[in-house]
């Protein structure tokens, strides 16, 4: 992540630069956020391609500010507001360093959600800076207190309580928080202590009481640090990802930033709860060494997949695809097929009917494996991994075919996944992986397939490198029409016979190994989304009723990024029983049975699962809908 630090010559700024030599920290002479003329500041930010701005620039002398607050107004309020404005304009994460003096300072143990009552003019001006920071969607306000690495005074209060610590203790936490997925307000400090106890850590000082002096200071600004403790103790469900999961490189460049997003399939029973879902930065990065695209934030898979609302069996197009796949692979009676993340068993059901083979479904969603078992598909309710693979081999023997359709893109530990596959695979067996294809993703503007379940976005180039490093070989790749453009990869143990289309595909992908290609594409995505939103706004202004069809994960990405909610879209119709009666995360749009379309008669229906548009439109026409459809991607289209 490329970081711009303002206030680099201050106590905190100096320490932060010791921790990360790549931080860009112009001096005040080079870049002045106080200046009336801010063209130079905007140009600097616009051309810097920064991922994060840390604003540690501030007037902090309480006594000077009480006498003359003008410099504090310019720095702490106006300068901070300028930076917030540019962070919005150029889609940059904004980390604003605030103060524990925001809180009243009487009771201590202040939570981030507690009411605020600034103690003095300094803290009022810092609150002004916080107000502008909140306007940046991806913002982090850090309330903290720190001092130089040595206590500067001869006396220290024994009745003033604080979470303050020395800057070399606080700075690493601030940098880690800046690089984290945490948003909103965050308290950072150390255990509650008196100022005297803090001073005695590094200096010899005399004890003194506040009442024995004329100094005006709050009695207890100690902070409740539970939010930070939870993040550090692995209780947070989101973690930053900084190293390529394919090749281990740190040369990752962010090219798509969709803002803060809720988990796409995390539906709620109340609209208010859906609107208030926790959000995390949804960003895609490009590896300059192996060309893999991957998310910058990883969500705990147990939070996404232990109960899953998508059912393969409700999708007629996917069922037909599974039937054809059984024929293509020439499944036979004696074959043993394992399907990883096999959902409700739809694929294996087709394999079993076609080849009467032995099948086993491995899926972490207990609600889906229960359905698969009820349909006669033996299932293991667990995440795929080496231990599961070993237990399967011990009980069933090695597999002739291992399939993983639309699951490889969900994985954080892709190496561990393939190692487990290799463990369970017979010597001449096949690993069949199907993923949305990165090139189609780019050429067809399929940015809505970006959501937290999709951790990686694959082309052949990085997959070949990954497999070779594990003693595997990609021997074939074939384009499939399902899901808007999918590639089927055949992977085997070291094998001499490699199909010609491997080298042909690798050659065709060479133009997609340059960072500029991805940055240009991102700008096109922004334009497409703005066009989609403005068209819907215009239709709504004209009095038309708009609904959606298919409460899909991709639809959730599109609607949240375009900021479409119930002001524009009345409802989303769907056929999945687990979704009906709930509300779409982030937008609060109700999800209803498709029969509601005939009752409410919307003038336009947005096909959110546009990759199945023909099937969906036919289905809705067959039940009696006779108005207009909107296809949002790859371009806004009325039918």
Image (spheres, rainbow, N blue to C red):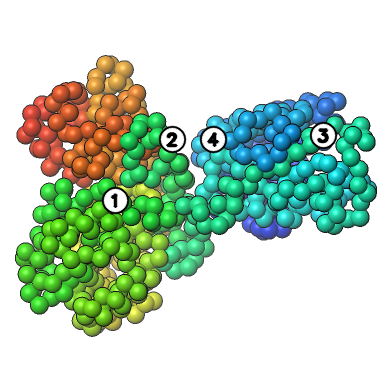
Q: Which element is circle 3 on?
A: loop
Q: What residue do we see at 43% from left, 46% from top?
A: 282
Q: Do tag 2 and tag 4 residues touch (Cβ < 8 Å)?
A: no
Q: Position of residue 166 (x, y in %)?
A: 77, 52
Q: Which element is circle 4 on?
A: loop
Q: Which residue is mark 3?
A: 217
Whole-number angstrom distance, CA of label 1 to CA of label 3: 53 Å
Q: Which residue is mark 2?
A: 276
Q: Which residue is mark 1?
A: 308
In front: 291, or 210? 210
Q: Horizontal placement of 520 versus 144: left or right?
A: left
Q: What residue do we see at 11% from left, 28% from top?
A: 625
Q: Position of residue 78 (x, y in %)?
A: 68, 28
Q: Horizontal placement of 119 versus 506: left or right?
A: right
Pointer 1 local density, CA inside 10 Å: few below 14, some 14–19, many at least 20: some
Q: Which residue is mark 4?
A: 136
Whole-number angstrom distance, CA of label 2 to CA of label 4: 17 Å
């Amino acid at each position: 992540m490329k970081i711009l630090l303002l206030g680099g010559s201050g106590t905190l700024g100096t320490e932060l630069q010791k921790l990360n030599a790549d931080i860009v920290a112009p001096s005040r002479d080079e870049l002045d956020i106080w200046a009336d003329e801010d063209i130079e500041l905007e140009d600097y930010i616009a051309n810097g391609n920064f991922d994060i701005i840390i604003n540690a620039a501030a007037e902090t002398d309480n006594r000077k500010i009480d006498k003359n607050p003008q410099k504090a107004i310019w720095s702490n309020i106006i300068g901070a507001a300028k930076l917030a404005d540019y962070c919005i304009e150029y889609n940059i994460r904004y980390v604003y360093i605030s103060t524990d003096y925001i809180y009243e300072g009487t009771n201590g143990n202040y939570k981030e959600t507690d009411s605020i009552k600034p103690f003095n003019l300094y803290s009022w001006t810092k609150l002004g800076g916080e107000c502008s920071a909140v306007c940046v969607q991806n913002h982090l306000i850090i309330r903290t207190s720190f001092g130089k690495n040595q206590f500067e005074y001869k006396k220290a209060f024994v009745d003033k309580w604080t979470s303050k610590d020395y800057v070399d203790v606080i700075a690493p936490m601030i940098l880690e928080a800046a690089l984290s997925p945490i948003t909103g307000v965050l308290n950072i400090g150390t255990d509650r202590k008196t100022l005297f106890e803090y001073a005695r850590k590094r200096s010899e000082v005399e004890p003194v009481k506040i009442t024995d002096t004329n100094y005006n200071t709050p009695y207890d600004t100690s902070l409740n640090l539970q939010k930070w403790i939870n993040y550090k103790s692995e209780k947070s469900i989101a973690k930053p990802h900084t190293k390529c999961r394919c090749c281990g490189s740190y040369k990752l460049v962010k090219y798509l930033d969709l803002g803060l997003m809720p988990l796409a399939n995390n539906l709620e029973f109340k609209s208010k709860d859906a609107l208030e879902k926790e959000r995390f930065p949804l960003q895609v990065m490009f590896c300059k060494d192996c060309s893999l695209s991957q998310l910058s934030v990883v969500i705990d898979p147990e939070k996404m997949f232990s109960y899953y609302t998508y059912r393969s069996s409700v999708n007629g197009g996917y069922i037909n695809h599974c039937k054809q796949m059984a024929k293509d692979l020439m499944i036979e009676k004696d074959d043993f097929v394992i399907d990883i993340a096999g959902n409700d068993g739809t694929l294996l059901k087709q394999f079993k009917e076609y080849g009467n083979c032995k099948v086993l479904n491995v899926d972490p969603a207990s609600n889906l494996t229960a359905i698969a078992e009820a349909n006669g598909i033996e299932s293991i309710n667990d995440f795929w991994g080496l231990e599961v693979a070993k237990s399967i081999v011990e009980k069933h023997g090695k597999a002739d075919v291992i399939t993983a359709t639309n699951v490889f893109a969900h994985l954080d530990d892709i190496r561990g996944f393939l190692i487990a596959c290799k463990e369970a695979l017979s010597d001449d067996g096949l690993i069949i992986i199907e993923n949305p294809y990165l090139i189609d993703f780019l050429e067809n503007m399929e940015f809505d397939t970006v959501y937290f379940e999709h951790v990686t976005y694959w082309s052949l180039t990085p997959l070949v490198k990954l497999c070779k490093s594990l003693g595997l070989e990609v021997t074939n790749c074939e384009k499939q029409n399902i899901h808007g453009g999918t590639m089927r990869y055949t992977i085997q143990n070291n094998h001499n016979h490699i199909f010609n289309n491997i080298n042909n595909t690798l050659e065709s992908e060479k133009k997609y190994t340059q960072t500029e290609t991805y940055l240009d594409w991102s700008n096109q995505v922004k334009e497409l989304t703005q066009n989609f939103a403005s068209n819907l706004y215009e239709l709504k202004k004209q009095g038309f009723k708009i609904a959606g069809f298919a409460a899909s994960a991709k639809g959730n990405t599109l609607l949240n990024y375009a900021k479409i909610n119930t002001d524009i879209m009345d409802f989303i119709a769907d056929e999945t029983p687990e979704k009906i009666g709930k509300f779409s995360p982030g937008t609060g749009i109700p999800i209803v049975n498709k029969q509601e379309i005939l009752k409410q008669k919307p003038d336009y229906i947005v096909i959110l699962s546009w990759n199945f548009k023909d099937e969906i439109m036919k289905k809705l026409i067959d039940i009696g809908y006779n108005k207009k459809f909107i296809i949002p991607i790859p371009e806004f289209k009325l039918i």
